[in-house]
Amino acid sequence: MRIKSQRDFYSGVLFSAFGVAFAWGAMTYNVGTGARMGPGYFPLVVGVLIAIMGVAITLKALMVDTVDGDPIGRIAWRPLIFIIGANLVFGALLVGLPSWGIPHMGLIVAIYALTFVASLAGDQFKFKEVFVLATILAIGSYVAFELALKLNFPIWPAFIG
């Protein structure tokens, strides 16, 4: 069988691999039954569904013709680096790095940093739009995590709270 869409084929294989790994990892928890679900039930179901979706995408890549074979393009390094970097900055700012002497900056500062760093991954950067988005995300996160869920993690920087 010939691969008719490289992009779909390899993305389907990756979906299948991650789904199987996720489902396998969920098996280390108590799965339970449909009526009495354990902590591993939901991750197992999600992993299986992702694997099934990956198989479907892979089969589609083998059966449906494309014009040019959908070759895999170059790796987009800029978005990859900025998105991963934004998540690392978020984690470091949220709880700090005590071993390096960096105190926690809390949820609000971490959300703003995450939004600004991640927005650098795109082709255009508009400060005003990013600032509005960061403000909405910060307020929404504060309401969801602090007020509604009452989760216990720092909201404000160490030197304020």
Image (cartoon, rainbow, N blue to C red):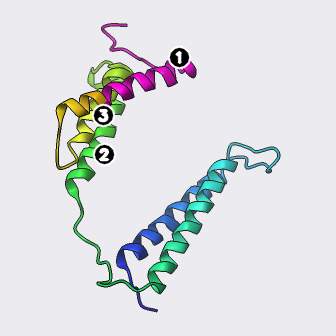
Placement of 30 over or under 13, stated as above or below: above
Q: Which residue is mark 2?
A: 84
Tell me which label, 2 or 1, sits earlier in the chain. 2
Q: Is residue 93 visible?
A: no
Instruction: Report the amino acid beneath label 2.
Output: Ile
Residue at mark 3:
114
Magenta region: 133-161
Query: Which badge, 2 or 3, is on the more N-terminal residue?
Result: 2
- Quarter of the view holding residue 142: top left
Residue at 34% over, 39% down: 87
Return the x and y of residue 79 as percentages of the image width and height.
Answer: 24, 51
Q: Nearer the viewer, mark 3 or mark 1?
A: 1
Marks 2, 1: nearer the viewer: 1
The amino acid on which the numbered mark 3 sits, given as a three-letter code, is Leu
On the image, the x and y values in percent for residue 34 come to: 79, 50
Q: Magenta span has 141?
A: yes
- Mark 1 is surrounded, within 10 Å at the Cα level, by few (under 14), some (14 to 19) or many (20 or more) other residues, namely few
Extreme residue toward the right, this view: 35
Residue 94, percent from left and from top = 37, 25
Give the amino acid at mark 1: Leu
The residue beneath circle 1 is: 147
Helix or strand or loop: what does disc 1 sit on?
helix
Could you tell me which residue is drawn at 20 percent across and 42 percent down? 120
Mark 2 or 3: in front is 3
